[in-house]
């Protein structure tokens, strides 16, 4: 017996295994970031004073635009597969990777500036939670990049053998990518604006 | 049992062809296997070894409590100068043993055995699945767990030794004390492993149920595993977050959990401050209370299977049991702060959490009552698995009922952090869950190996363990009610009010060491039965659930034909039926 419902959906649940799996994983991610956001709230409420204007809002806003754009290109990468347009899929997936790397480069310049100013995590609870939240988010971006590079490289072989399964894999990657994007959409106002 | 093979010769041929294509080498077959049965056995054996190791730590601690300051016999000289000079245990080493005993028993012993072991091995078989939904992820879960376990073990060796701030790792102490960094790294591995595993479990149960296996036909064991997986999935990430934050506090010098103005050994700490030590407790218990149900729910599942099978009757109130564990799962997320009544978090919070705590005791009582009523009027087969299952009921009841005074803030003030608490949760987990796990090993051993374990050794193991374990934990209630604190290096001798209670430390010590001796028959039985046990066919207990339709041991892909389910899970002694069991897999 082979494992069923890898590609086709199970009639009574309407789901393929991978889709349910990625949603459950995202549920646990919500709890992870939820705990960290709660930490932010508790530290801020308990702090005698909370710093404002420590971060470069323009870089943060730019990165927000970059990530939202990358979510769009990610959807296009999946939609192109649905329309069997392999060339466009490659293009959009590469664009997504490029935007993700662009985000990380920006983040690097932001971090470098704080390090130069001796604003390290040990400086205050604000910088502690700032570095922890954005660092963990950055690791998620990096994880996404690794997965996308895999699908651009050795993982792309599957398109020939099993196009439906490959399309599903890109869809699940996209779901993860939108989640990472969404986390940033919360992080940006919470850390840069409020 | 030939009727199973009549369902379709096409699938039968397919299975053979499949097997022929999958002849794997030793490493892929037994070490880096993706087969859920091999992974389940890997989890189970590793979990059992960690249980033994964690118990050994406690036996060493019990020497220090029974005979404070006397050299430890046998192994004392081997522990090293920085742990036990001349064989006499140092306080730091005592603290390491305590912290690591808790950590190892919970995260490396019981959960991997109950969920990773039994869940992995039995659940896919019970739902008629060929494997887990994501076999490679399953292998990865085990190996990530393995790395976490090795990290924990290795943490004993660097200078300063292992973590010594209790398994709860409360800051500020945990941020300052040596050994904690490796504990945190190990925990992050273990949490990641649990997350991967829980996703896999839920997807498998939702997606891979066999034809005809509707939700209300699922064996109760599967329900228990499903709720457990949800608890692991949603409760563990906050501890992962907390672990990352504490790691930042230790490594990057942040002050998430460190308040301003801390003075250590007469010197003010050079930290930014403004952190909140209570925040750790909230994040920790947000996991660790659901974790209690992670420890107990698989045990409910295991003993339900054993009780239904050996009473030869349907479980009493199957649907009630299912609704009770689902409700219990939800409630377990909003009771965590009953561990924190003494932190001064305010009476409103205490009132809320003691109310939810009283509410969550209801489903536990329902489960226990239903299982007790299942025994009514039955002609019970008293084999080793059934003895362990039967012992579970009163032991868990003692553990549960002694928890009520701890769940109420006024009585908790007296009992908090005393031996009463230790007695309470050990009654739930040790003669409760671990007895259920032993029962499970005896019950499913024939499925995993094709051999039955020796019954005589089983009886010796059971009765010896049953008597000793009660002698270990019952006196702790007396000590705790007398006000004896936990985590005392000298066993509490420095406090005058403990004077009359110290004699119990001797009783507990000897009972614990005897308990250790009574595990020897189990170990012998476990290994010798693999080779010399009585060979059995695929359904030696005459059970009804799907795993007993597969060969013993099941091959790759589990079932020779695609299983189809025709009825509920516990149709024993159906009036008018030819035999006293009507399996799910027979039309």
Image (cartoon, coloured by chain):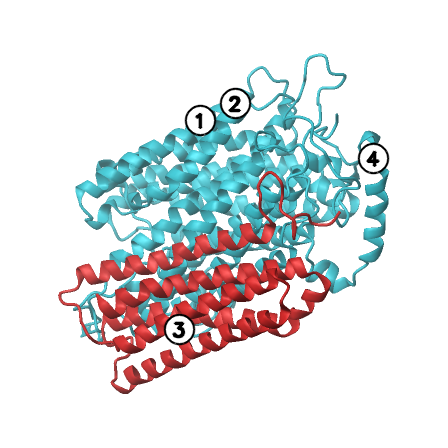
* Percent of width and height locating residue B485: 29, 48
Q: Residues within 10 Å of mark 3 (few under 14, many from 20)?
A: many
Judging from the image, what secondary structure is the residue with disc 3 in?
Answer: helix
Q: What residue appears at the point 55 percent right and 46 percent down from the top-left corner?
A: B202
Q: Which residue is mark 4?
A: B5
Asked if one can make out residue B159 in the rendered structure from this viewpoint, the answer is: yes
Q: Which chain is cyan?
A: B
Judging from the image, what secondary structure is the residue with disc 1 in?
Answer: helix
Mark 2 vs mark 4: in front: 4
Asked if one can make out residue B424 in the rendered structure from this viewpoint, the answer is: no
Kindly report the distance in space between the C-alpha atoms of the residues bearing marks 4 and 3: 59 Å
Q: Which residue is mark 3?
A: A66
Q: Which residue is mark 1?
A: B366
* Percent of width and height locating residue B7: 81, 33
Kindly report the distance in space between the C-alpha atoms of the residues bearing marks 1 and 2: 9 Å
Among the two numbered marks 2 and 4 on one chain, the one whose residue lies closer to the N terminus? 4
Kindly report the distance in space between the C-alpha atoms of the residues bearing marks 1 and 3: 54 Å
Q: What residue appears at the point 79 percent right and 39 percent down from the top-left corner?
A: B561
């Amino acid at each position: 017996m082979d494992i069923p419902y890898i590609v086709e959906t199970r009639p009574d649940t309407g789901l393929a295994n991978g889709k349910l799996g990625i949603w459950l994983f995202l549920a646990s991610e919500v709890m992870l970031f939820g705990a960290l956001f709660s930490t932010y709230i508790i530290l801020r409420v308990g702090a005698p004073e909370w710093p404002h204007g420590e971060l470069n809002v323009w870089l943060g806003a730019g990165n927000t635009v970059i990530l939202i754009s990358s979510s769009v290109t990610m959807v296009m990468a999946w939609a192109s597969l649905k329309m069997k347009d392999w060339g466009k899929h490659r293009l959009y997936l590469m664009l997504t990777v490029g935007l993700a790397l662009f985000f990380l480069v920006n983040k690097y310049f932001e971090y470098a500036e704080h390090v130069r100013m001796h604003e390290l995590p040990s400086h205050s609870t604000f910088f502690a939670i700032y570095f922890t939240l954005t660092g963990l988010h950055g690791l998620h971006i990096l994880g996404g990049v690794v997965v996308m590079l895999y699908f651009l490289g050795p993982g792309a072989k599957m398109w020939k053998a099993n196009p439906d399964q490959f399309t599903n894999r890109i869809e699940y990657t996209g779901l993860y990518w939108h989640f990472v994007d969404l986390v940033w959409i919360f992080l940006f106002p919470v850390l840069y604006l409020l | 049992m030939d009727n199973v093979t009549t369902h379709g010769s096409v699938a039968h041929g397919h299975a053979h062809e499949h097997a022929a294509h999958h002849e794997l080498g030793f490493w892929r077959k037994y070490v880096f296997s993706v087969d859920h049965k091999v992974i389940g056995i890997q989890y189970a054996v590793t979990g059992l070894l960690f249980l033994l190791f964690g118990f050994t730590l406690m036996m060493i601690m019990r020497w220090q409590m029974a005979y404070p300051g006397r050299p430890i016999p046998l192994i004392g000289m081997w522990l090293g100068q920085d742990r036990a000079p001349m064989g006499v245990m140092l306080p730091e080493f005592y603290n390491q043993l305590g912290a690591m005993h808790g950590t190892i028993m919970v995260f490396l012993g019981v959960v991997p055995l109950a969920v990773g072991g039994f869940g992995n091995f039995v659940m896919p078989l019970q739902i008629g699945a060929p494997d887990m939904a994501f076999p490679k992820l399953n292998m990865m879960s085990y190996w990530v767990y393995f790395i976490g376990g090795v990290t924990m073990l290795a943490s004993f060796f660097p200078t300063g030794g292992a973590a010594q701030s209790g398994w709860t790792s409360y800051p500020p102490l945990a941020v300052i004390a040596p050994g904690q960094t490796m504990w945190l790294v190990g925990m992050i591995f273990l949490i990641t492993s649990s997350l991967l595993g829980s996703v896999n479990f839920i997807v498998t149960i939702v997606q891979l149920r066999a034809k005809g296996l509707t939700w209300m036909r699922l064996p109760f064991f599967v329900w228990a595993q499903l709720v457990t997986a949800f608890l692991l999935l949603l409760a563990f990430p906050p501890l992962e977050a907390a672990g990352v934050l504490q790691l930042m506090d230790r490594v990057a010098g942040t002050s998430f959990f460190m308040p301003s103005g801390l003075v250590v050994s007469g010197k003010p700490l050079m930290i930014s401050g403004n952190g909140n030590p209570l925040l750790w407790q909230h994040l920790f218990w947000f996991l660790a209370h659901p974790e209690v149900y992670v420890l107990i729910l698989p045990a409910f599942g295991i003993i339900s299977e054993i009780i239904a099978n050996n009473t030869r009757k349907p479980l009493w109130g199957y649907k009630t049991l299912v609704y009770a564990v689902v409700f219990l799962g939800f409630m377990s997320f909003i009771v965590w702060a009953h561990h924190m009544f003494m932190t001064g978090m305010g009476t409103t919070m205490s009132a809320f959490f003691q109310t939810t705590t009283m509410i969550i005791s209801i489903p536990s009582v329902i489960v226990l009552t239903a299982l007790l009523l299942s025994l009514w009027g039955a002609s019970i087969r008293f084999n080793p698995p059934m003895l362990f299952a039967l012992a579970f009921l009163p032991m868990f009841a003692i553990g549960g009922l002694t928890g009520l005074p701890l769940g109420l803030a006024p009585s908790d003030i007296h009992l908090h952090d005393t031996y009463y608490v230790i007695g309470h949760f050990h009654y739930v987990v040790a003669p409760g869950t671990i007895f259920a796990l032993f029962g499970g090993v005896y019950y499913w051993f024939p499925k995993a190996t094709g051999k039955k374990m020796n019954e005589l050794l089983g009886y010796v193991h059971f009765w010896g363990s049953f008597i000793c374990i009660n002698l270990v934990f019952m006196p702790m209630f007396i000590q705790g009610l007398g006000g004896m604190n936990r985590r005392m290096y000298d066993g509490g001798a420095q406090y005058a009010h403990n004077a009359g209670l110290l004699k119990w430390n001797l009783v507990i010590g000897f009972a614990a060491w005897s308990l250790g001796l009574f595990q020897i028959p189990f170990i012998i039985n476990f290994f010798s039965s693999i080779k010399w046990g009585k060979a059995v066919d695929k359904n030696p207990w005459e059970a009804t659930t799907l795993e007993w339709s597969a060969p013993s041991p099941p091959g790759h892909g589990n079932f020779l034909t695609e299983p189809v389910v025709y009825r509920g899970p516990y149709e024993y002694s159906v009036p008018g039926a030819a035999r006293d069991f009507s399996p799910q897999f027979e039309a």
